[in-house]
Image (cartoon, helix red, strand yellow):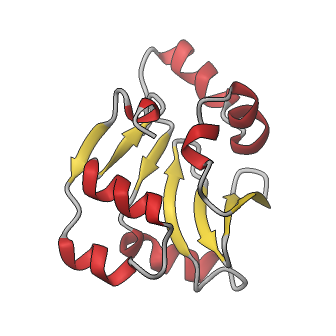
Amino acid sequence: MDKIFDGFSIEASVPEALIIKYKDRVPEEILEAWQNYGFGTLMDGYLKLVNPQEYEEILEESSERYKDSVVLFTTAMGDILIWSDGYVRLLNYRYGIVKTIMSKFKFFFQSLESEKFKSDYLMWKPYQEAVKKTGNTCL
């Protein structure tokens, strides 16, 4: 997990009360990331590890099916990664689709090291092109 957090940009530490609130609702790896790194960006700004409370209303308003899920990440392209029923799912607002990325969470951070995974599952190529074109990250 540590390798994917090289270059992590912290925005805030995670309050202990929030960790306690979500300890039975999110994967252990997320709790560890919150404790070790806090909230912030990784993957050159593409993924943002977020406070799920800040996205509850957005999730409730945009998805009847997943309104009780937990938002784990947002992307620089405006998408949301959620934890739902033991699966990591991508709510891709750009294309109006929902993708199940993987069951369980154990290998999620390791998968982020794969260009194929990032391209096929997170659809991150437009972000790379935008960063090259503008010279800065978007998040």
| 43 in relation to 109, above or below | above
Left or right relative to 114: residue 52? left
Left or right relative to 130: residue 56? left
Please state which of residues 9 and 57 is positioned toward the viewer in this rendering: 9
The x and y percentages for residue 20 are 29, 80
Q: Quadrant of residue 102?
A: bottom right
| Residue 97 shows up from this direction | no
Image quadrant where one finds the C terminus: top left
Q: Quadrant of residue 24?
A: bottom left
The x and y percentages for residue 48 are 43, 48
Left or right relative to 20: residue 90? right
Please state which of residues 107 and 83 is positioned toward the viewer in this rendering: 107
| 69 in relation to 134, above or below | below
Residue at left offset 59%, top offset 30%: 113
Residue at left offset 72%, top offset 83%: 65
Residue at left offset 69%, top offset 26%: 115
Please state which of residues 102 and 67 is positioned toward the viewer in this rendering: 102
Q: Quadrant of residue 19?
A: bottom left
